[in-house]
Every structure is written in C-alpha cells, then in structure tokens.
Amino acid sequence: VVLFVGSEQRRKNLGTLVAGLAKFREKEPGLVFVKAGVAQSKSGHGRFQSALKADQLEEATVFLDGLTDDQMVQLYQAADVLAFPSVEEGWGVPVLEAMASGIPVLSSQIGPIVEFAGDSVLYVDDPYSSRDWSSGLERLAGDNSLRERLRVIARHRAQTLTWDRARELFAANLNLVGA
C-alpha cells in the first residue's frame, strides 16, 4: 500500500507520482494506492483523475476523505510507504505523522522535509521524474534492511519533534539573544 496524504494542488506533484506508480506497478501488479485528504478544487481533482486514467491506475486507487485522527493513525499503520511528492511545502505534516507511525517515507528533497526529517526519509533525486519515484518505491520494496533502518531512525526523530521541545528551543534562543 502506497499512501499519499494531502490535497490535489499542483504543488503536490501528484501527476508525476501517479506516472511513477504506473511504472512501479509493472513490477508490483498488486499495488494499492491510497489517497487520503480533501480534493480542495474541481480542477485539481480533475487533473488527478485524468492522470489516474491515463496511467490506468483508477482501479488500484482508493480515495479516503473526512477521516478521524484515530482512523488516520490506523491508515498510516496499514501503509507500506508514504509517498510525498510535493515540490513546495511550509512544513509537511504527513511526513512527520508517517515517521511517528514507523512507516518509511519516500519524499521530494525540499527544504522543510530535509530540515526536520534528515536521513530518516528516502529522497528522490528529481521530484519531476516518474522514473525516480518508481525507482525509489522499488528500492523500498526490495530492501528490508533499508525499510527497517528508516523506521527506527524516523520514530526516534519524530519523538524529538514535540511542542515541549519547540518551546525549550525557543526559550534557549531567546536567552542567547538576551531577551
């Protein structure tokens, strides 16, 4: 199960991910793609549906919307990998949620994700390359030790990213500047 959590805005880069999933599915015909989250716009949903149809992934895709927090926890725990193809993000909450759930993350190498996730995530070289997304998924599917290493590092890192820790760091930085 490949999971994507988020909207269908252009910056989410879902078309490229879908093309990568189609390539990956040639080697993994049992692929299930779960898209969780609100569409937000008809145009974004239309682009996404067109990509699924063009790459013949409609029947392999499950849409989930309006899930509770408990249902989201269960969804993360049921997934094999979170795919995060965004090319612009302010933070990337689904990555942190996946890390805390102990599932591997395949992500675009963008500022906020690199900053907080570091080496606990597998990154694609080119977020606009469907081949890179397919290769990353193949690598995760075929390497148990890599998946386990990412799980361990991600869970540990996620435990350090709490509001209490953020307050401590903020207070320490205020003390450094003499506030």
Image (cartoon, rainbow, N blue to C red):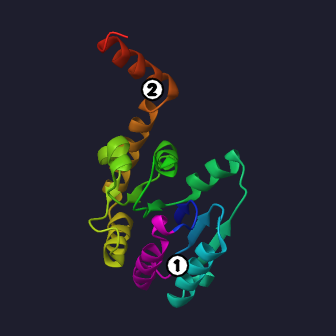
- Tell me which residue sits at (70%, 61%) in the image: 65
User: Can you identify the residue that label 2 sits on?
Assistant: 166
Q: Could you tell me which secondary element the residue under label 2 belongs to?
A: helix
Near mark 1 (Cα within 10 A), the count class, few <14, some 14-19 or many ≥20, is few
Query: What span is in magenta?
Result: 10-29
Q: Earlier in the sequence, mark 1 or mark 2?
A: 1
Place of residue 24 in the rendered image (x, y in percent of width and height, measured from the top left): 41, 78
**Residue 15 shows which numbered tag?**
none
Residue type (three-letter) at the residue carrying disc 1: Gly
Residue 52 relative to residue 165: left or right? right
Compared across the picture, whether 51 is left or right of 20 comes to right
When the figure is inspected, residue 105 is found, relative to residue 126, above or below; the finding is above
* Placement of 120 over or under 174, stated as above or below: below
Displayed quadrant of residue 133: bottom left
**Residue pictured at 34% horizontal, 55% vertical:** 110
Q: Are marks 1 and 2 in contact (CB under 8 Å)?
A: no
Q: Which residue is mark 1?
A: 30
State the predominant SS element of the stretch in magenta.
helix
Q: Relative to the observer, which residue lies in front, 8 or 29?
A: 8
Q: As shown in the figure, which amino acid type bears the numbered disc 2?
A: Ala
